[in-house]
Image: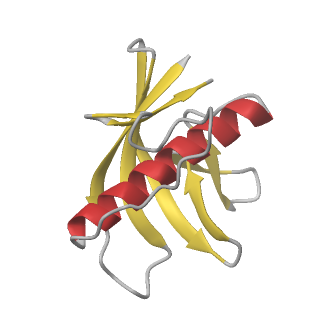
Amino acid sequence: MKINTNINRIIDKPDSSVKAFASASFDGYFAVHGIKVCEGEKGLFISMPSTSYSNQNGEKKYKDIFHPITKEAREALNTAVIMAYNAELAQSQGSDIVVQDSPGEETAEQSMDASGPMMPL
């Protein structure tokens, strides 16, 4: 399965943990919007779109609307979205991404298409 990603909006607020909003499509069959790129103590991660509800005790809870089921799928989606975010950030800052080639490995440029990185799932 190929994952195409797109960074819809970068959040330019230094005090915000949310850094961007992204979308992803899977083999052109399914799409998910509202993925958040967040920065935490351990670095960048993604947060899937969610809905809120109140439990029996009246506490506000959140539940993902869409999410990867396996660890491998979550890692592939996380990597694809964060790669797209870093590329978009570098482009918006006028920087070039420098990738050092290793024999037999694709460069970031080779694995990108016009809509963002394509990651196997």
Q: Position of residue 89 (x, y in %)?
A: 33, 65
Displayed quadrant of residue 59: bottom right
Q: Residue at x 61, y 45 (%)?
A: 102
Q: Is residue 93 left or right of residue 121?
A: left
In the depicted view, which residue is nearer to us: 17 or 117? 117
Q: Residue at x 48, y 59 (%)?
A: 37
Considering every residue shown, the one lying at the far top of the view is 29
Q: Position of residue 34 (x, y in %)?
A: 40, 46
Q: Is residue 91 left or right of residue 21?
A: left
Q: Is residue 81 left or right of residue 103?
A: left
Q: How many marks?
A: 0
The N terminus, quarter of image: top right
Is there any visible trace of residue 10 in the rendered image? no
The C terminus, quarter of image: top right
Q: Position of residue 83 (x, y in %)?
A: 48, 51
Relative vertical location of residue 92 with respect to residue 51 in this rendering, above or below: below
Q: Residue at x 50, y 53 (%)?
A: 82
In the depicted view, which residue is nearer to us: 113 or 7? 113
Is there any visible trace of residue 112 in the rendered image? yes
Q: Position of residue 79 (x, y in %)?
A: 58, 46
Relative vertical location of residue 10 with respect to residue 24 in this rendering, above or below: below
Q: How is the image coloured?
A: secondary structure
Considering every residue shown, the one lying at the far front of the view is 103
Relative vertical location of residue 28 with respect to residue 66 in this rendering, above or below: above
